[in-house]
Image (tube, helix red, strand yellow):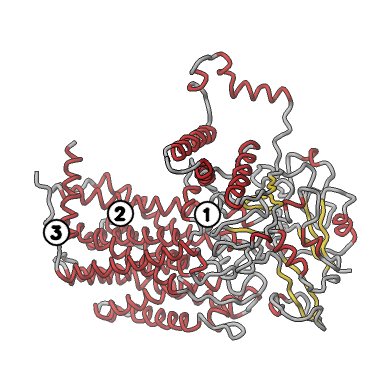
C-alpha cells in the first residue's frame, strides 16, 4: 500500500517536472509536438490510401521505415556498452551515464516498434500476431524472434532504471542483488536483439546482398559505434543545459568504446568490399549498384559516398588519443560517425538488397514526402520520450525530486 | 523419397497413403502442411474420443459444460467464438436506428474482423466464413458470388511445365490471369512476367526485358515466363510471422488474405519475384469481376495484403486447367497432377530435359522449363 502511495506521488512529481522548465525547454517540446502532429497527419494519409502513399513498390518492398528500424535496433543495443562497465565491472565512471543510456534505449525501442507498425499493410489486424488469440509463428519466423527480443529488452530497460530511480526517489540505496542480475541479463539480451535483427535479413537466401555471414557481427560493430556516439552527444547536451554533472573522464571513456567499435566496423567493411569486388560474381551486383550504380541507375551513390568518407574520417580521427580526448573533436567525430552509420546501415543496407530484383530488374526507390513525414514524426516521438525520461531521471539523481511523506 | 528420379525430391509415387511418414518436403515432422492425419483406425478414434470427452459422459447438468478438460487452443477457440457471437449480438441489437440489413452487415463485418486463421479452421468454420463473404457481397452489391472452400484432394500434387521453344511472348496468359484472378486494374498487377531474351545470350535475365510493348515474336528473341513456382520448400512460408501463408496438401502455396498483416517479409524471402502486394485498395470494374471464386484464390482482396498466383485454385481443384494454360495459343504451358503417371506433366518430366530456376537455393519449385 505504501509503495502504491509512493508510486502515485512519483507520477505526480514527474508530471510536474516534465511540464515545467525553462523557455528553451518549452520551445523544444512544442517543436517536437508539432513534428509529431505532422507525422500523425502523414500517417493518416497513409492509412487512407494504403502504402501506395510511400515510394515502395513490388520491386523494392521495404524502404525508409525498415531502414530506420534496423538502425535504431542498433542504437538500443548500444546501451549495453554502458551497462556492462557500470553494473558488472563496477566501473564507477559510467554511473551517471548509464541511466541516460538506458533511457535512450527505451526511446529507440519505442521508435523501432513504431517504425514496424508504420510499415505494416494491416495495422488493424496486428492482434493476429499475439500469442494465444492469434498465431505466433515461433520459432520458424525470425520476425517473431525479433518481436520477443525487442519487447523483452524494452521491459528490461524500463524495469531496471525504474527500480533504481524508485529507490533513490525514496532516499534509499538500490539493492545491487536485485538489479545486477537484470543488468547482466540485459548485456546478453542486447547482443541478442541486434543479432536477431541481422538474422532477419541474413536468413534470406533470396537476397545475396544480405545472405552473408558477416552481417550479424557487422551489425554489432556498427551499433556499438553509432549508439555510444549518440550517447556522447546527448551527454554533451545534458551537461550544457542541466546541472547534472558528467565528468570529462566518463565522456572520454565512452569515446574510447566508440573508437574501438568504429575500427572493427571499418575492418569488416574492408573485408566486405574485398569479397564483393576482388572476384565479383553475379551476387555482387547489389554492391555494384550501391557503390557505382548499375546501368545508369545511381540513386544511392551520393549517399554511400557521403557515408564512407565520413566513416573513414571519424575512425581515423578517433584512433589518435590526442584528438579523441579533445572534446570538440570528439563531438564532431561522433556526429559524423552517427550520420555515416545511419546511411550505411539504413537504406544503404536495405534498399540494395532489392536491387537488382530476383530476375535482374533494376527499379529504384525514392521515399515520398508522406514517408519522410512519418519518419520524422517517429524520430520526434523518440526525442520526446527521451526528454521526458531524462528530465525526471536527472531530477531524481540530483536529489531534487524526493518523496515527501 | 524416390531416389531414381533425376528431378528428385518430389514424391511421385502413385499411392500417397503408402508413405505417410514422409512427404515431398523431406520432413517427417509435419510443418510442411502435406502430412495428413486422417488415417486413424476405428479403435484409435474411440480412444481419442474417450480421452477427449470421456469424463463428460458421466457428468450431467452444467458440469458437462463447465467441468470440461480442454487444451489451450480449444479454450481460446471457444472463447473467441462466444465473444464474437456475444459482441456481435450486442452491437447489432443495441442499435435502434439501423434496419435489419444494416444490422446483418454490421454483424458480418464484426465476425469477419475477428475470425481466425483459415489454415486452422475446421470445415464448419470455413463454410461459415465463405457464407458470410458471399452474403456480405450480396447485401453490398446485390449480386451473388459462387465461392468455394474446397480442400486439397487426396493423391494430387500440382505441377507445371513451361516449353521455352513454344512461347512466342503473346502475353495472352497474362491477360487471362488478370481477368480470372480479379487483380487490381489500377496498378496493373500481374502475377506472370514474360521475359524477352536475346538469342545467343542464354538465359540472361539481366539483359531480358519483362516489360515490352512491341510486336511479338521479335526477331532474334525468345521468351520465358515466370510466376509463383509453388516451391515444395517455400522460403516465404517459413518467414511469415502469423502463418498467413502455407503449403496446401496438393502443393499449392496459398495466402489467407484476411489473416495477412502486410509486413511483406515473404516478399523479401521469395527468390522468384512470385509475390505481389496491394499497395492501395484493389479496383476491378463490377462487370469484369469473376464471380466464380475460391476463398484461397481469386476472391476480392483488400489493401495492405499479399497475394500471388495460386495455380488458379478455383479452377485446378475443380478439375480444370489454370487460366494461363487455357489461354496460351502456342501450347507452351502444361499443368497437371504429378502423382498421376498418365498425366502430360509426368510425360514431360520423364521424357524432356527439364530444369528449374535457382535450384541451388533448395526451394524445390514445382515449375519446370524444357525445350522441344
Q: Say which residue label 3 marks.
A: A398
Query: Secondary structure under badge 1?
Result: loop
Q: How far apart in space, not on screen, are marks 1 and 2 (Cα)?
A: 41 Å
Chain to which the residue tagged by mark 1 belongs: B
Q: Which mark is residue A324?
A: none
Q: How far apart in space, not on screen, are marks 3 and 1 (Cα)?
A: 46 Å
Horizontal and vertical percent position of residue B296: 66, 50
Q: Is residue B321 left or right of residue B89?
A: right
Query: Secondary structure under badge 2?
Result: helix
Seen at 49% across and 38% down, the residue is B84
Q: Say which residue label 1 marks.
A: B261
Count residues near mark 2 (Cα–Cα under 10 Å), then give few for <14, some for 14-19, many for 20+.
Answer: some
Q: Is residue A135 at all visible to an observer of this figure? A: no
Horizontal and vertical percent position of residue A35: 32, 69
Horizontal and vertical percent position of residue B269: 60, 61
Q: Is residue B238 left or right of residue A305?
A: right
Task: Please identify the quadrant where the C terminus of chain B is shown.
Answer: bottom right
Seen at 56% across and 50% down, the residue is B259
Nearer to us in this view, A207 or B193: B193
Q: Say which residue label 2 marks.
A: A88
Chain to which the residue tagged by mark 2 belongs: A
Q: Is residue A160 at all visible to an observer of this figure? A: yes
Count residues near mark 1 (Cα–Cα under 10 Å), then give few for <14, some for 14-19, many for 20+.
Answer: many
Chain to which the residue tagged by mark 3 belongs: A
Query: Secondary structure under badge 3?
Result: loop
Asked if marks 1 and 2 fall on the same chain, the answer is no
In front of the other: label 3 or label 2? 3
Seen at 51% across and 55% down, the residue is A143
Count residues near mark 3 (Cα–Cα under 10 Å), then give few for <14, some for 14-19, many for 20+.
Answer: few
The vertical placement of B343 against B178, above or below, is above
Asked if marks 3 and 1 fall on the same chain, the answer is no
Nearer to us in this view, A77 or A265: A77
Amino acid at each position: 500500500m505504501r509503495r502504491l502511495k509512493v508510486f502515485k506521488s512519483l507520477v505526480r512529481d514527474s508530471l510536474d517536472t516534465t511540464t515545467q522548465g525553462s523557455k528553451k525547454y518549452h520551445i523544444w517540446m512544442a517543436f517536437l509536438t508539432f513534428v509529431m502532429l505532422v507525422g500523425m497527419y502523414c500517417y493518416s494519409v497513409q492509412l487512407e490510401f494504403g502504402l501506395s502513399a510511400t515510394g515502395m513498390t513490388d520491386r523494392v518492398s521495404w524502404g525508409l521505415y525498415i531502414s530506420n528500424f534496423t538502425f535504431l535496433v542498433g542504437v538500443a543495443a548500444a546501451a549495453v556498452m554502458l551497462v556492462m562497465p557500470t553494473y558488472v565491472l563496477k566501473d564507477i565512471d559510467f554511473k551517471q551515464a548509464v541511466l541516460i543510456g538506458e533511457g535512450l534505449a527505451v526511446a529507440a525501442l519505442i521508435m523501432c516498434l513504431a517504425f514496424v507498425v508504420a510499415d505494416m499493410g494491416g495495422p488493424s489486424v496486428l492482434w493476429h500476431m499475439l500469442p494465444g488469440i492469434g498465431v505466433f509463428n515461433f520459432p520458424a519466423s525470425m520476425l517473431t524472434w525479433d518481436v520477443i527480443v525487442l519487447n523483452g529488452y524494452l521491459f528490461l530497460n524500463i524495469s531496471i532504471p525504474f527500480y533504481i530511480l524508485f529507490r533513490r526517489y525514496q532516499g534509499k540505496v538500490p539493492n545491487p542483488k536485485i538489479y545486477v542480475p537484470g543488468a547482466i541479463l540485459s548485456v546478453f539480451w542486447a547482443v541478442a536483439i541486434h543479432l536477431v535483427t541481422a538474422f532477419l535479413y541474413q536468413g534470406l537466401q533470396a537476397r545475396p546482398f544480405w545472405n552473408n555471414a558477416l552481417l550479424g557481427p557487422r551489425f554489432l560493430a556498427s551499433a556499438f559505434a553509432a549508439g555510444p556516439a549518440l550517447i556522447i552527444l546527448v551527454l554533451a547536451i545534458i551537461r550544457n543545459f542541466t546541472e547534472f554533472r558528467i565528468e570529462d573522464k566518463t565522456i572520454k571513456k565512452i569515446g574510447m568504446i566508440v573508437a574501438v567499435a568504429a575500427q572493427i566496423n571499418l575492418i569488416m567493411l574492408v573485408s566486405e568490399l574485398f569479397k564483393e569486388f576482388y572476384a565479383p560474381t553475379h551476387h555482387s551486383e547489389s554492391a555494384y549498384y550501391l557503390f557505382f550504380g548499375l546501368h545508369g541507375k545511381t540513386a544511392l551513390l551520393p549517399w554511400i559516398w557521403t557515408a564512407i568518407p565520413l566513416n573513414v574520417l571519424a575512425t581515423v580521427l578517433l584512433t589518435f588519443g590526442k584528438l579523441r580526448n579533445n572534446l570538440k573533436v570528439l563531438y564532431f567525430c561522433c556526429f559524423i560517425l552517427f550520420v555515416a552509420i545511419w546511411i550505411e546501415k539504413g537504406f544503404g543496407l536495405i534498399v540494395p538488397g532489392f536491387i537488382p530484383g530476383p530476375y535482374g530488374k533494376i527499379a529504384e526507390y525514392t521515399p515520398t514526402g508522406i514517408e519522410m513525414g512519418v519518419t520524422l514524426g517517429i524520430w520526434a516521438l523518440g526525442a520526446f520520450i527521451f526528454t521526458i525520461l531524462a528530465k525526471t531521471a536527472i531530477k531524481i539523481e540530483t536529489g531534487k525530486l524526493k518523496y515527501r511523506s | 523419397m524416390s531416389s531414381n528420379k533425376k528431378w528428385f525430391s518430389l514424391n511421385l509415387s502413385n499411392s500417397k497413403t503408402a508413405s505417410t511418414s514422409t512427404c515431398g518436403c523431406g520432413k517427417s515432422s509435419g510443418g510442411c502442411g502435406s502430412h495428413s492425419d486422417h488415417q486413424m483406425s476405428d479403435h484409435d478414434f474411440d480412444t481419442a474420443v474417450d480421452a477427449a470427452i470421456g469424463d463428460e459422459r458421466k457428468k450431467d447438468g452444467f458440469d458437462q459444460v463447465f467441468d470440461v478438460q480442454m487444451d489451450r487452443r480449444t479454450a481460446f477457440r471457444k472463447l473467441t467464438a462466444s465473444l464474437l457471437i456475444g459482441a456481435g449480438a450486442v452491437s447489432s441489437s443495441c442499435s435502434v436506428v439501423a434496419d435489419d440489413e444494416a444490422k446483418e452487415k454490421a454483424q458480418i463485418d464484426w465476425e469477419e474482423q475477428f475470425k481466425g486463421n483459415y489454415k486452422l479452421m475446421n470445415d464448419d468454420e470455413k463454410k461459415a466464413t465463405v457464407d458470410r463473404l458471399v452474403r456480405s457481397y450480396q447485401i453490398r452489391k446485390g449480386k451473388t458470388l459462387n465461392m468455394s472452400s474446397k480442400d486439397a484432394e487426396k493423391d494430387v500434387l500440382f505441377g507445371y511445365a513451361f516449353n521455352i521453344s513454344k512461347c512466342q511472348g503473346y502475353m495472352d496468359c497474362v491477360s487471362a490471369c488478370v481477368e480470372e484472378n480479379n487483380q487490381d486494374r489500377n496498378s496493373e498487377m500481374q502475377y506472370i512476367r514474360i521475359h524477352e531474351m536475346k538469342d545467343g545470350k542464354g538465359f540472361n535475365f539481366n539483359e531480358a526485358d519483362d516489360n515490352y510493348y512491341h510486336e511479338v515474336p521479335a526477331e532474334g528473341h525468345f521468351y520465358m515466363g515466370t510466376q509463383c513456382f509453388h516451391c515444395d520448400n517455400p522460403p516465404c512460408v517459413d518467414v511469415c510471422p502469423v502463418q498467413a501463408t502455407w503449403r496446401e496438401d496438393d502443393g499449392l502455396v496459398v495466402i489467407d488474405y484476411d489473416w495477412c498483416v502486410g509486413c511483406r517479409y515473404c516478399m523479401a524471402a521469395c527468390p522468384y519475384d512470385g509475390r505481389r502486394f496491394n499497395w492501395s485498395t484493389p479496383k476491378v470494374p463490377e462487370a469484369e469481376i469473376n464471380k466464380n471464386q475460391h476463398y484461397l484464390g481469386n476472391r476480392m482482396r483488400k489493401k495492405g495484403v499479399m497475394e500471388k498466383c495460386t495455380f488458379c485454385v478455383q479452377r485446378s481443384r475443380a478439375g480444370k486447367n489454370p487460366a494461363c494454360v487455357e489461354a496460351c495459343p502456342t501450347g507452351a504451358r502444361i499443368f497437371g497432377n504429378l502423382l498421376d503417371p498418365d498425366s502430360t506433366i509426368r510425360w514431360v518430366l520423364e521424357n524432356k530435359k527439364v530444369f528449374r530456376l535457382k535450384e541451388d537455393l533448395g526451394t524445390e519449385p514445382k515449375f519446370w522449363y524444357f525445350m522441344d
